[in-house]
């Protein structure tokens, strides 16, 4: 697995490199220290996973992730930060990051990278604990400007609750294929990338 590390703390970046390279299966292709370098290094090395801090000078990790994902929707970005702020979690999900873990969880870094590489989304235990609280704020937005029907709104709500297509189908007495078609249509109407962004959009009440 090829990884690029971006963190504005040189000591943290070097420590991460040491930890990762202790694993024979991980190669650290490069280290960057701000969001601008993250964008440059991603395009130069095309890593399997970009491991990146959020709060950095010149350009934040969130801004860098957004730029990268605009160019490459398949980019796998794992945020590693000391901050478990709700707003950061929402924004990380919204831009399309594959994970958000805390730096304090050193033991979980390598497993998280491997999970993200395999296509999973990863959130550290302390982050997962906060997601239910974020879900308390769902609903409430004005969807009329997006031409979202009541049925589509119901499906959005169930996606935000974390239900699978099969579970949504059972709840609404639809086939799984119909649910998939509905979700594809909703994503197109809202100009969103995937189910994660759809859930975040709904939880935020579609307010920017």
Image (cartoon, grey):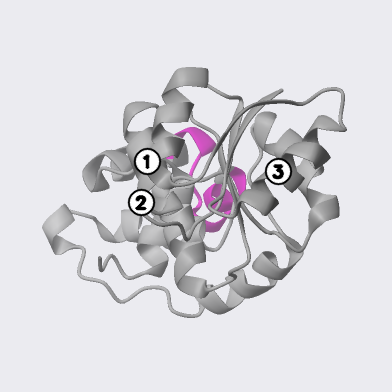
**Which quadrant of the view contains residue 77?**
top right
Q: Earlier in the sequence, mark 2 or mark 3?
A: 3
* Classed neighbour count for the residue bearing mark 2: other residues with Cα under 10 Å, few (<14), some (14–19), many (≥20): some
Q: Confirm or deny contact between disc 2 and disc 1 (CB under 8 A).
A: yes
* Classed neighbour count for the residue bearing mark 1: other residues with Cα under 10 Å, few (<14), some (14–19), many (≥20): some
Q: Outermost residue toward the front?
A: 10
Q: Residue at x 53, y 48 (%)?
A: 169
What range of the chain is rendered magenta?
166-178
Give x and y (percent) for residue 5: 60, 38
Q: In this view, does 171 lie above or below 70?
A: below
Helix, strand or loop for disc 3: helix
Helix, strand or loop for disc 1: helix
Q: Confirm or deny contact between disc 2 and disc 3 (CB under 8 A).
A: no
* The C terminus - image quarter: bottom left
In this rendering, position of residue 31 left or right of residue 183? right
Q: Which of marks 2 and 1 is nearer the N terminus?
A: 1
Give x and y (percent) for residue 1: 71, 22
Give x and y (percent) for residue 33: 50, 45
Q: Nearer the viewer, mark 3 or mark 1?
A: 3
Residue that label 1 marks: 36
In this rendering, position of residue 54 left or right of residue 19? left
11 or 208: nearer the viewer: 11
Q: Which residue is drawn at 15% across and 62% down?
A: 144
Q: How far, Cα to Cα, is label 2 from label 1?
A: 6 Å
Query: Magenta stretch mostly in which secondary structure?
Result: helix
Residue that label 3 marks: 14
Residue that label 2 marks: 59
């Amino acid at each position: 697995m090829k990884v690029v590390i971006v963190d504005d703390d040189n000591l943290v970046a070097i420590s991460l490199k040491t930890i990762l390279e202790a694993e024979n299966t991980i190669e650290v292709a490069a280290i960057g220290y701000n969001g601008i370098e993250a964008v440059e290094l991603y395009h130069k090395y095309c890593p399997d996973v970009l491991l990146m801090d959020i709060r950095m000078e010149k350009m934040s990790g969130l801004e860098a992730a957004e730029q990268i994902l605009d160019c490459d929707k398949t980019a796998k970005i794992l945020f590693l930060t000391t901050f478990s702020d709700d707003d950061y979690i929402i924004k990380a999900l919204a831009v399309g990051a594959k994970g958000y873990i805390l730096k304090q969880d050193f033991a979980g870094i390598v497993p998280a990278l491997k999970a993200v590489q395999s296509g999973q989304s990863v959130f550290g235990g302390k982050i997962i604990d906060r997601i239910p609280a974020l879900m308390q704020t769902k609903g409430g937005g004005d969807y009329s400007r997006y031409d979202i029907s009541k049925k589509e709104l119901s499906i959005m709500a169930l996606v935000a609750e974390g239900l699978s297509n099969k579970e949504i189908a059972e709840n609404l007495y639809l086939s799984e294929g119909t649910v998939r078609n509905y979700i594809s249509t909703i994503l197109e109407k809202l100009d969103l990338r995937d189910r994660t962004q759809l859930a975040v959009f709904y939880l935020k009440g579609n307010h920017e």
